[in-house]
Image: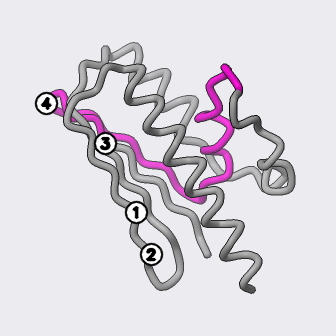
Amino acid sequence: MVFLVVEQKKKLIKMTDEVLKFLFQKKAKDINISLSEKEDKYELIANSKTNISDKEMEYIISNFARHKDLEYDFYWELMGENSEEDELELLFILADDVRIYYENDIFTMIIELKK
């Protein structure tokens, strides 16, 4: 059981890194990231002020807000630390739930990972 908790925390660290990288690429301002541990899950919430077009939001929602793919759980650590490729999409396949909102120039992403 301890091994699983450590693995989940490693995934959360990588997800947080990729979310922050994504927000920097979008020239986001006032970035806030919080990570909380609940009884049965971890919750990562990121929000920031940024300008995202309707077309970009459609792309983000269709590519990032996907359901978990259990096959990726076995190979997620193979994703490179120094890779130039955007790994945010791949990491969200590891999440149990991803919700994305954009209203009044505030972009919010809520990512849940079960324990």
- Determine whether 77 is above or below 39 in the image: above
Give the residue pinned by disc 1. 35
For the rendered model, the colour scheme is: one colour
Whole-Å distance between the Cαs marked 2 and 4? 29 Å
SS under mark 1: strand
* Residue sticking out furthest to the front: 82
SS under mark 3: strand
**Sequence order check: which comes first, mark 2 or mark 4?**
2
Give the residue pinned by disc 4. 104
* Image position of 41 (left or right of 5): left
Badge 1 density bin: few <14, some 14–19, many ≥20, Cα 10 Å: some
Residue stretch rendered in magenta on the structure: 83-107
SS under mark 4: loop
Task: Specify the amino acid type for callout 2.
Answer: Glu
Residues at marks 1 and 3 touching, judged by CB atoms closer than 8 Å: no
Membership of 92 in magenta stretch? yes
- Determine whether 78 is above or below 89 in the image: below
Whole-Å distance between the Cαs marked 2 and 3? 19 Å
Q: Position of residue 36 (x, y in %)?
A: 39, 70
**Sequence order check: which comes first, mark 2 or mark 3?**
2
